[in-house]
Amino acid sequence: MLTNQGARCETLGNAVSQENVELVRRLYAELASEGSTQQFEQRMSDDALGRFLDPEIEWVPVTESLLAVDSYRGFDGVRRFWGEFLSAWERYRVETLRFDDAGDQVAVVVHIVGRTHELEVDETRSSLLTVRDGRVVRVQSFADPDGARQAAGLPP
């Protein structure tokens, strides 16, 4: 489960940049929605993903991740990433903490709590999402909560 309760947002003031932040906020809220496996699969349909993601999206997991693939491409890749991610957890919760506007990119900080492979996890991580023409074209994840801000050239 993902949540965005209390997430902070810092923007540069540009209307397009603010639209990008809102798009990313809605994407996280959609992925955060609780529900059955069938409901989650519906959220992973081409139509549902196409509201947020470019069909040629590249999704890059944390390099030290349990997910051994360098990147996932397209809607099928996104479905494969989420399937592998979800299968690794006995339980988890992801809360969005912060959205930072970086023009055509949005840095997101998340707090992950859960249990995987008999280990308790309590981590704060980040992702940098690149937006073009109203859709996310790239997601790059970082183990460091400041990694996305640094990659976007934002101050600490």
Image: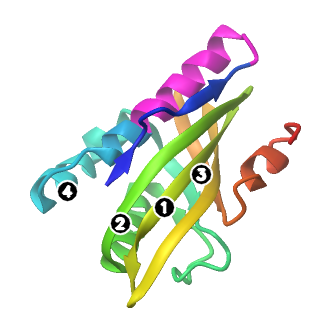
**How many neighbours does mark 2 have within 10 angstroms: few (below 14), some (14-19), or many (20 or more)?**
some
Q: Residue at x 21, y 54 (%)?
A: 40
Residue 83 drawn at (x, y percent): 32, 70
Q: Residue at x 74, y 26 (%)?
A: 103
Q: Are marks 4 and 1 in contact (CB under 8 Å)?
A: no
Report if residue 121 lies within the magenta region.
no
Q: Earlier in the sequence, mark 4 or mark 1?
A: 4
Residue 9 drawn at (x, y percent): 62, 26
Query: What range is drawn magenta here?
Result: 12-27
Q: Secondary structure at mark 3?
A: strand
For mark 2, what is the residue?
Answer: 92
Q: Are marks 2 and 1 in contact (CB under 8 Å)?
A: yes
Q: Are marks 2 and 3 in contact (CB under 8 Å)?
A: no
Report if residue 15 lies within the magenta region.
yes
Q: Residue at x 19, y 56 (%)?
A: 41
For mark 3, what is the residue?
Answer: 139
| Nearer to us: label 3 or label 1 | 1
For mark 1, what is the residue?
Answer: 112
Q: Secondary structure at mark 1?
A: strand
Q: Earlier in the sequence, mark 4 or mark 3?
A: 4
Residue 41, disc: 4
Q: Amino acid at mark 1?
A: Ile
